[in-house]
């Protein structure tokens, strides 16, 4: 059997909940794999699900090896649980959920010293 004929299987994923990490890995076996990360976040008592894959652009991207990367971490956007999904023509596999916690800098106040 070749890898293209097999169900994908996740073989390595970031193994703990993380704080202020700029990337989380998800490595799977198989061929022709498509990696998708989903973010689950509670916002105003509603669960919001965001999806990221290799076509994503902006602050969050997914590499072809399944690593999700954050260019700039934002407390209001990126806090939450993340789960890696990998699929090919034969099926899909998924990781456990990982919690990404961003420390808030809300206690810092910016003062513009040029204004009086």
Image (cartoon, helix red, strand yellow):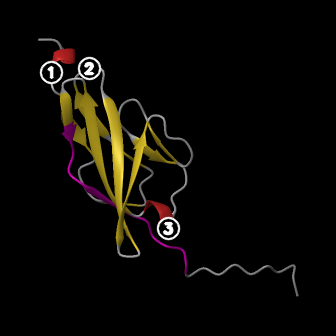
Residue sitting at x 16%, y 16%: 5
Residue receiving disc 2: 31
**Element type where label 1 sits in the image:** loop
Indicate the quadrant where residue 66 lies.
Answer: top left
Q: Are marks 1 and 3 in contact (CB under 8 Å)?
A: no
Closest to the observer, 22 or 54 = 54
Indicate the quadrant where residue 82 lies.
Answer: bottom left
Which comes before the other along the chain, label 3 or label 2?
2
Residue span colored magenta:
93-106
**Element type where label 2 sits in the image:** loop
Horizontally, residue 43 falls left or right of residue 10, namely right
Q: Mark yes or no: residue 8 visible.
A: no
Residue receiving disc 3: 76
As drawn, the residue found furthest toward the front would be 46
Residue receiving disc 1: 6
Marks 3 and 2, how far apart in space?
A: 36 Å
Crowd rating for badge 1 (residues with CA inside 10 Å; few <14, some 14–19, many 20+)? some
Marks 1 and 3, how far apart in space?
A: 39 Å
Q: Quadrant of the N terminus?
A: top left
| Percent of width and height locating residue 34 | 33, 30
Q: Is residue 80 above or below residue 27?
A: below
Q: Is residue 32 above or below residue 106?
A: above
Residue sitting at x 24%, y 31%: 28
Residue 3 drawn in magenta: no
Marks 1 and 2, how far apart in space?
A: 8 Å
Q: Are marks 3 and 2 in contact (CB under 8 Å)?
A: no
Horizontally, residue 68 falls left or right of residue 91, namely right
| Percent of width and height locating residue 19 | 38, 62
């Amino acid at each position: 059997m070749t890898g293209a004929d097999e169900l994908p299987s996740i073989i390595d994923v970031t193994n703990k909940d993380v704080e202020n990490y700029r990337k989380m890995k998800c490595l799977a076996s198989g061929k022709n794999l498509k990696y998708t990360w989903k973010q689950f976040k509670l916002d105003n008592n509603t669960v919001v699900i965001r999806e990221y894959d290799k076509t994503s652009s902006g602050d969050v991207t997914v590499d072809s090896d399944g690593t999700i990367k954050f260019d700039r971490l934002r407390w209001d956007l990126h806090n939450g649980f993340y789960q890696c999904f990998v699929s090919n023509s034969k099926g899909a596999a998924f990781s456990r959920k990982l919690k990404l916690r961003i420390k808030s800098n809300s206690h810092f106040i910016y003062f513009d010293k040029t204004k009086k």
